[in-house]
Amino acid sequence: MSNMDSTSNNSFIPKRGTTNKRRSTSTRQVYVFTIISYSFLFATLIASAGSFFYKDHIQKNETAIMAELSKETADFDEVGMQQVQEFDRRLIQASGRLNTTVSTVTIFEALEAATINNVLIEALSIERIGDESLQVVAQIETDSFDATLFQRSIYNINQTIGTVEIKDVQALNLDADTIPQSDSSQQRLPTVSFTAEFDVLLSDIPYVAGFSAQSLPLPVMEITPQTEQFIEDVSTTQSAAFVEQANNNQNNI
Amino acid sequence: MSAQGLFTQLGMIVISIAIIITYIQPAFADIAVMQDDIVIYENELKEASEVSTKLSGFVLKLEGVTSDDRRRLLTYLPNTVDEIAVQRDLSLIAKEAGVLYISSPYTGTVDNIASEDLPSQSTFDLSVEGTYGQIKNLLRLMETNHYLLEIVNLDITRTEGGFLSADFSLVVYSYQSLSNSN
């Protein structure tokens, strides 16, 4: 053991003393303001770069969408639009008139149905009041006030001819209570004349297409090619059949 | 902190503020404006696309209308009223109905400026004579005409021999185009 101690003490390696030397540390101070200022500067620079690139990106987007919009505008089918508008307008105008089309024949048929036998219509006028109603004025003669009253009641219950107003009632020759034969004398008949005014709503007498006999085309020649064709031409046979059918219907009524 | 370092840091802050004021803030404002514009353009583009799509559909529908239907529509509401053709038609209708055609003078055309939905009106005065049945037949024939013969006024009076005299005021309609109304 003593031999070993002597060997180690003879080493050429310098021995370190057992005393602990205190290591000197240099402290560097970092201030909060420094951190803030650096952070602020770098944040500003980063924001500048970011806003630059983002603005560039947005500008490109805007340019692209503007170009797309310009292309869409340029590609817009103006001719087609005009054609569609014109066609739509024509349809609106046509349907507007079609919806207010009335059947005047219906008024005649209603009057036929509502007029009693001893009443004579001397004159009749029909006036269209806008697209709302028709004003029908009939000059009527009959042989007594009773017939007048009865006629008024019949008109009042008729649903087609609407409201009726009896005006200008005049009595002539009411003392003649005998009705002469048609060609036996010149004696005047007892007469009560009056004016009947009817207000007929257009909606009460709409024209309804589809009456088979009447739906035949009218016998009208073709017009010149430079203008629109009004009515188709039709053979004379069809026209004759049409008239015959119409007359039959009239007789039935 | 040394005085030099402090001034440097203050300079950095000042430079930062200057950058914010002179570049970043205007850039953000520009970006906001551009974004708003983009939204507007996108909406416009969307609407334009929708209109184009709808228009394409309408054009297809329009092209799908048969020539026969177009001709019928053009017949019902022609671009112009040929007054001579109408008078000829009226005389032929009167002949077909069996009434005695007297006259049907053309009295003029009025454009409906007040409303876009109303067509132009051409007026004719038709005078005929005949029996009650014939006049009724005439009315029936006029109702079934391929273009509208609208009766605005009708006066029927008795004449000698049991016949009736009928005076019509008729309106024939023609299409009032956009260019006409404008």
Image: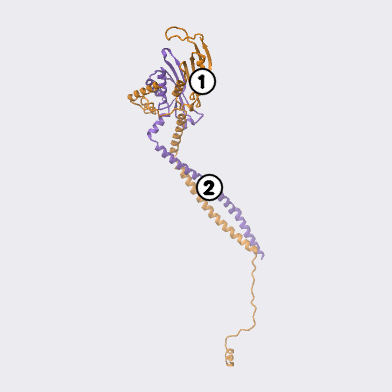
Chain colours: A orange, B purple
What chain is tagged by disc 2? B
| Lateral position of residue B4 relative to residue B61, left or right | right
Who is closer to the viewer here, A123 or A98? A123
Label 2 sits on residue: B39
Who is closer to the viewer here, B53 or A49? B53
Q: In this view, does A83 lie above or below B155?
A: below
- Report which quarter residue A105 is drawn in: top left
Give the image location of residue A24, x and y in percent: 64, 76
- Report which quarter residue A234 is drawn in: top left
Residue in the picture at 57% in, 57% down:
A47
Give the image location of residue B75, x and y in percent: 40, 29
Element carrying mark 1:
helix
Cα distance between the residues tagged 2 and 1: 72 Å
Q: In which quarter of the image is the N terminus of chain A?
A: bottom right
Label 1 sits on residue: A153
Query: Residue type at mark 2?
Result: Val
Who is closer to the viewer here, A1 or A242? A242
What chain is tagged by disc 1? A
Can you tell which mark lies on residue A136?
none
